[in-house]
Image (tube, rainbow, N blue to C red):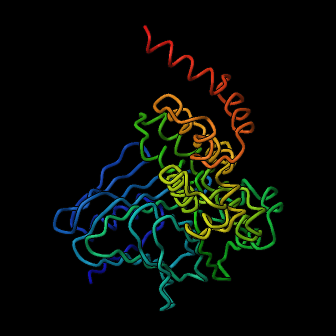
Amino acid sequence: MQTITCHSIPFKEVLNDLAIELETSYTQSCEEYTLIIPEKYGSGSIKGINFKEGLGLLFYNCTFNEDLEIHFIVNEVHPLKFLFCEKGGFSHHFQNKEEQHKVRVLENIIVASNKKNGHVLRFKAGVHTIINSLEINRELFIKTMACQIQSLDSVLEKLFLDTKASEQFYYHGDYSVQMADLFERINSNQLNNFIRTIFLHGSAYKLLTIQIVEYHDSKNSEGNQSLLKRRDQILIMEAAALIENDILDFKTIKKLADHIGLNPTKLQNGFKHIYGTTINEFVQNRRLDLAKNLIKGTDHSFSEIAYMVGISSKSYFSKMFKDKYGLTPSDIRKKKSKDSQR
């Protein structure tokens, strides 16, 4: 395993240390610094930008040829770190601890080392890894946020006010759709220096805002959470695809929830958030779409078609059909007949 060491905290010095270790150089665009990984070590880049009130963003987008550890070791209090794994995976451990914290895609950790102990990030060989890191110098940050920090819950308030790093802190969770959307906007940003810096500055605060809400959400029961996790979104979209592909075999929400591995409440709430409709309404609409195609493309009676799409009452079928399309099944078939005679 390769090991490289960083003995600095401001990102300009961080990128300089990493460049020396990787036998390369870094570039500067205003206050944003970029290091391109040399082919000898892998591919990709590491970028960083600091803001005067103690916030900073560090973006890892890299693939290393060998397993590699980056040791952040400096005889100062280290920043409070919020690390988000957008792709691949990595592990973290505190400099003075052996326990490895494995972080998989769509997961995040909040870490603060105690005293002047540092952090170690480990990257696996050949794994394209994207990590977005928000780092906060707490001593600088509380000078502008001392009053507002008092409104946080007791755990977070204590964490932010611990400017001397008297205690170690570790939190591990999944990040939300809102966070994933923010990373997508950051990654696709092609703005120039002035606007980009303002955008990244605002994004740092937005990232922190979403993370605090996510942290509070993690302490609530699943039915009382305000943000949808990105991992859950993927499962809910899988559920929608299952309904689409096997609409006639849909049984119950509980069976669907069991199949994809979510509880029914989270599935229903998330489904409504993504698709703007309940699961039952979604199923009903898809069955009516199928019925409309059968009316147009076959000579089956309306009772037969209602039965085929899982609706037992012909009158109820006709009512739902008219509510959705503004026409009765008879109207659709008459229109089809007229069109065929032209």
Q: Quadrant of residue 265?
A: bottom right
Image location of residue 305, percent across then percent down:
58, 40
Image location of residue 33, percent across then percent down:
38, 52
Determine whether, in the image, residue 131 is placed left or right of residue 111: left
Determine whether, in the image, residue 23 is placed left or right of residue 327: left
Of residues 334 and 219, which is closer to you in this image? 334
Of residues 69 and 298, which is closer to you in this image? 298
Of residues 321 and 98, which is closer to you in this image? 321
Of residues 223 and 29, which is closer to you in this image? 223
| Total numbered labels | 0
Report the quarter where the N terminus lies. Answer: bottom left
Report the quarter where the C terminus lies. Answer: top left
50 above or below 220? above
67 above or below 30? below
Image location of residue 108, percent across then percent down:
54, 68
Determine whether, in the image, residue 315 is placed left or right of residue 238: right
Q: Residue at x 51, y 83 (%)?
A: 94
Instruction: Name the outermost residue toward the bottom.
Output: 98
Q: Residue at x 50, y 64 (%)?
A: 106
Q: Quadrant of residue 250?
A: bottom right
235 above or below 338? below
Q: Quadrant of residue 319?
A: top right
Q: Residue at x 32, y 67 (%)?
A: 18
Instruction: Name the outermost residue toward the left.
Output: 40
148 above or below 95? above
Image location of residue 314, percent across then percent down:
70, 39
Q: Residue at x 41, y 58 (%)?
A: 12
